[in-house]
Image (tube, rainbow, N blue to C red):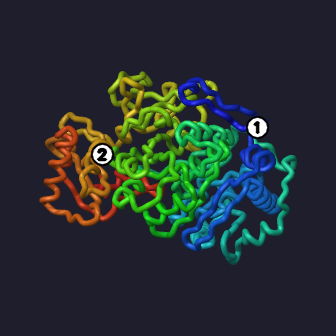
Amino acid sequence: MSEFIELPDYEAAASVRLPAPEFYNFGFDLIDRRAAVADKTAFIYADANTGEVSRHSFSDLSAASNRFANLLGSIGAAKGDFAFMMLPRIPAWYETMIGCIKCGVVPMPGTGLLQPKDIEYRINKAGAKLAIVWHEHAAKIDVVLGRCPSLEHLIVVGGAQDGWIDYEAAVERQAAVLDRASAAPTRADEPMLAFFTSGTTAFPKMVPRNHDYAIAHTLTARYWQDLRPDDVHWTLSDTGWAKAAWGMLFGQWQIGATLLLYNPTAQFDAEEHLRAIAEHGVTTFCAPPTIYRAFAQLDLAQYDLSPLRHSISAGEPLNPEAIKVWKEATGTIVHDGYGQTETINVVANVPGMEVRPGSMGKPVPGLDVNIVDDEGTVLEEGAVGHVGIRLTEPWPPGLFQGYWDDDAANAACFRNGWYYTGDTAYRDADGYLWFVGRADDLISSAGYRISPFEVESALIEHPAVAESAVIGKKDELRGEIVAAYVVLAKGHEGGEALTREIQDFVKATTAPYKYPRQIVFVDALPKTVSGKIRRVELRAMANGEG
């Protein structure tokens, strides 16, 4: 590709088409090209644990990733090999990811929260030949090494370990230049990296992402994140989540923005994060709903949030009340967006478009996203159905082409000319999509179909509620009743009086039949490693199934 990608505004972009090269490599075609043509700060590294702050240019990143690619070549790692990766938010994550991509090794990022059994499953599912991990996690690999026969090379970052290649020492011995001709060419339709789904209902599914996925995220950066080359963008995400690819890697550098790579303290500190916005000049900010809800519990007037010009959220729908609190404090409206590990951002509240709090927004240009029934028929306005992405030629940008070695899952999600996301929603008269819930999360009570999100949105408006999760509990009379698990805000105590108060509040805020007939006060909600609420676990607990 000879030029960097430029895309028109949303209103002019209905038929936008991204470049579709036969061969593409993000490391060479984007990182090295920016280093050569328009070198600037690629990312700012800030470590809340040590106080270190450093700036890294595209040329720095090009050289460091070349060193790692040369290291991989020296140990015999080859194109198509899978590499399990578990690194925190440190520069080495970028260096190893891009080094792998340059030589065609397929990284499989994982969060540091994974336990040995999770790691063993991922390595064996892919037949991974390499493990690249932070020194604190090396012991987890050692525990399962004997049960992972495909593993050939162990690379440790941050501290030497017996039996492991010391990353820092090894890359220091490698050349900072890499002849592209010496690397096996990578086709745009070949695997570049792989993520695993959150596993909310079953074993995580392996999701390969091809090299053109790096191009497709230009749509994410342009039409949802509203990025410009002079922005400093910060996405709160663990490096093991697909959200890191959305907000910490591909689309931002396609646009030419600078990233903030922020390594936080072990325990989430809302104040620490709020201070970092001004300290590092963050202009565009993305956080999951959980974080915005935590921010809403603080006096936001104490913090300098003036650098912000655009705020976004994804992961689960953001409740309108949290949007309101953030706008009052920052002047920015949180633009919700929707997508999955299997996609790029496919629905968004696009900058310049009216934001309707609670709505996911409208389909992103280049993708046909709609609400369909089980047979693939597009439903009328207001009808709840499956969120589907129409399968087109050329293939929809950023949509994966199937789970790894899982014919049953592929048959279930690719059918009738659509990709079925597993989520349900409805479309209003103006084309906005409104999330209802995971298909298996909908509550059927006395003939009513109730969205957990609608009830949670009402609950969060009550001053005593910091966070909630709503599920259906089996009931002989109604089939199911609405049950709510509630985390209380500081200064509030659970009890019968508060239960009745919250129930009455929900009745007055939304349709009375949606109110939670049972409220359970809890200290925390069960979540996946990517921060999504595990309603399946709550349902099993409520119904005595686990």
Residue ID at (37%, 55%): 293
Mark 1: secondary structure: loop
* Residue at mark 1 to residue at mark 2: CA–CA distance: 46 Å
Left or right relative to 325: residue 304:
right
The residue carrying pointer 1 sits among few (fewer than 14), some (14 to 19) or many (20 or more) residues within 10 Å by Cα, namely: some
Q: Which of 422 and 205 is in front in this view?
A: 422
Residue ID at (73%, 45%): 30
- Look at the picture and state if 284 lies above or below 174: above
Residue ID at (55%, 27%): 391
Mark 2: secondary structure: helix
Q: In which quarter of the image is residue 190?
A: top right
Foreground tag (1 vs 2): 2
Q: Quadrant of the N terminus?
A: top right
- Look at the picture and state if 268 lies above or below 219: below
Residue 401 visible to the viewer: no
Q: Residue 23 carries which label?
A: 1
Three-letter amino acid code of the residue under disc 1:
Phe
Q: Quadrant of residue 13?
A: top right
Query: Residue 464: horizontal and vertical position, in percent?
Result: 24, 58
Residue 71 visible to the viewer: yes
The image shows a total of numbered marks equal to 2
Q: Which of marks 2 and 1 precedes in the sequence?
A: 1
Query: Residue 41: horizontal and vertical position, in percent?
Result: 69, 54
Labels 1 and 2 touching (C-beta < 8 A): no
Residue ID at (62%, 24%): 393
Three-letter amino acid code of the residue under disc 2:
Ser
The residue carrying pointer 2 sits among few (fewer than 14), some (14 to 19) or many (20 or more) residues within 10 Å by Cα, namely: many
Query: Residue 443: horizontal and vertical position, in percent?
Result: 27, 41
Q: Residue 85 carries which label?
A: none
Location of mark 2 (residue): 457
Q: Quadrant of the C terminus?
A: bottom left
Query: Residue 460: horizontal and vertical position, in percent?
Result: 29, 51
